[in-house]
Image (cartoon, rainbow, N blue to C red):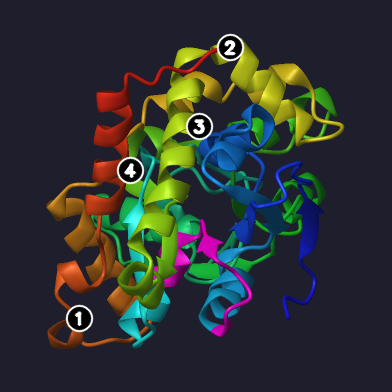
């Protein structure tokens, strides 16, 4: 079972709806394509009763492999497992930009080069936070292994580490940054690198078991139809989407949620697929992280399959489907 995961049951009035478990690592704006279908009923339209599981990739991926999770939205963590032999496939990436920012508390740290030998707070080892940091260092001609990656877990721990100055640097979202400013916690922290602006990296993708594609491709496609609808709604209705995301973040202020909308949408992929170049880059970096030799990396078509979301998108276009507020 998924220890420590919080489940949010979405009750369906349709008795025939198939129950599925969907793991998400956050309820931030970049998860809007998965959250909107819950509120708008898109999952139900496609025949699903969704149970949302709050779990990072380190928990969700083993849960998916064991059969506890049907759809895992921590595709980057799933990639690490695929490289080690797990029978999973990545079928969707809504974004290829990351709304992350690097903040520091040590006044001596002015550039990425000053991070050598110092800790940077991330969520979990090998996650998109770490990969983004590694890519940023590499882009600046620096060794990504010269930084100590401190795993602080899902939630507000990175924000707390900055506020308490218990870590010299941490990666947070603009929502966290705004919340810290509002709470007066930002006085000792400052941003030195905008990862969302400078680093291209796929984010919050969907992974499924390979057997699910082979045995019931239509089921997987129906799920992607719902998510594609969620993305279309997200792109069409800014304020309504912000309200929906806010409804899944009790206690968050609307301004903080709204502050991430434009930045998140700027990283939208064409229909949920990333380029072959980005597929290769992601696979190569992950392989280095999990110590898989480059010559042992599987062919890209054994890792990714974006034909399902392509077909789902084309079906909806042929049907003339449009989101209604």
Q: Earlier in the sequence, mark 1 or mark 3?
A: 3
Q: Which residues are magenta?
A: 66-79
* Image position of 110 with respect to 141: above or below: above
* Nearer-N-terminus badge (4/1): 4
Q: Tag 1's secondary structure?
A: loop
Residue 1 to residue 313: above or below:
below
Dot 3 or dot 2, earlier in sequence: 3
Q: Mark 2: few, some, or many residues within 10 Å (few <14, many ≥20)?
A: few
Which circle, 2 or 4, is nearer the viewer? 2
Cα distance in 3D space between marks 1 and 3: 33 Å
Residue at figure coordinates x 46%, y 31% from the top left: 229
Q: Which residue is mark 2?
A: 325
Q: Which residue is mark 1?
A: 297
Separation of marks 4 and 1 at Cα, in angstroms: 23 Å
Q: Which mark is residue 200?
A: none
Distance between the alpha carbons at the discs numbered 4 and 3: 25 Å
Q: Nearer the viewer, mark 4 or mark 1?
A: 1
- Tell me where residue 208 appears, x and y as whole percent: 43, 66
Query: At 63% across and 15% down in the image, what residue appears?
Result: 240
Which mark, residue 230? 3
Q: Residue at x 34, y 88 (%)?
A: 85
Q: Which residue is mark 4?
A: 199
Q: CA distance from mark 3 to mark 2?
A: 12 Å
Instruction: Mark 1 or mark 2: name the one nearer the start of the chain.
Output: 1
**Circles 4 and 1 in contact, beta carbons < 8 Å:** no
Res. 243 image quadrant:
top right
Which residue is more in the foreground, 321 or 115? 321
User: Upstream in the sequence, badge 2 or badge 4?
Assistant: 4
Q: Which residue is found at the position 67% from the left and 62% from the top?
A: 55
Which quadrant of the rendered structure holds the N terminus?
A: bottom right
Horizontal and vertical percent position of residue 296: 18, 87
């Amino acid at each position: 079972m998924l220890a420590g995961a919080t489940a949010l049951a979405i009750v369906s009035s349709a008795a025939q709806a198939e129950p599925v478990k969907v793991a998400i690592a956050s309820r931030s704006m970049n998860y809007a394509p998965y959250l909107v279908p819950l509120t708008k009923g898109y999952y139900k339209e496609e025949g699903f009763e969704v149970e949302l599981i709050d779990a990072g990739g380190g928990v969700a991926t083993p849960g998916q492999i064991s059969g506890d999770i049907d759809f895992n939205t921590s595709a980057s963590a799933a990639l690490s497992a695929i490289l080690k032999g797990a029978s999973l496939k990545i079928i969707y990436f809504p974004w290829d930009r990351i709304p992350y920012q690097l903040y520091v508390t040590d006044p001596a740290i002015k550039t990425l080069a000053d991070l050598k030998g110092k800790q940077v707070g991330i969520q979990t080892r090998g996650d998109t936070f770490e990969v983004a940091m590694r890519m940023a260092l590499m882009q600046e001609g620096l060794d990504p292994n010269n930084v100590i990656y401190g795993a602080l877990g899902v939630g507000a721990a990175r924000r707390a580490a900055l506020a308490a100055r218990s870590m010299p640097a941490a990666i947070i979202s603009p929502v966290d940054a705004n919340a810290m400013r509002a709470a007066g916690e930002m006085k000792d922290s400052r941003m030195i690198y905008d990862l969302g602006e400078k680093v291209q990296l796929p984010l919050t993708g969907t992974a499924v078991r390979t057997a699910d594609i082979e045995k019931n491709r239509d089921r997987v496609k129906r799920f992607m139809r719902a998510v594609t609808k969620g993305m279309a709604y997200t792109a069409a209705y800014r304020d309504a989407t912000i309200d929906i995301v806010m409804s899944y973040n009790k206690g968050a202020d609307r301004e903080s949620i709204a502050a991430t909308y434009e930045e998140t949408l700027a990283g939208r992929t064409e229909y949920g697929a990333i380029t072959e170049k980005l597929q290769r880059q992601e696979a190569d970096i992950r392989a280095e992280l999990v110590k898989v030799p480059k010559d042992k990396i599987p062919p890209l078509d054994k890792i990714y399959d974006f034909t399902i979301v392509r077909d789902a998108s084309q079906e909806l276009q042929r049907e003339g489907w449009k989101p209604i507020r």
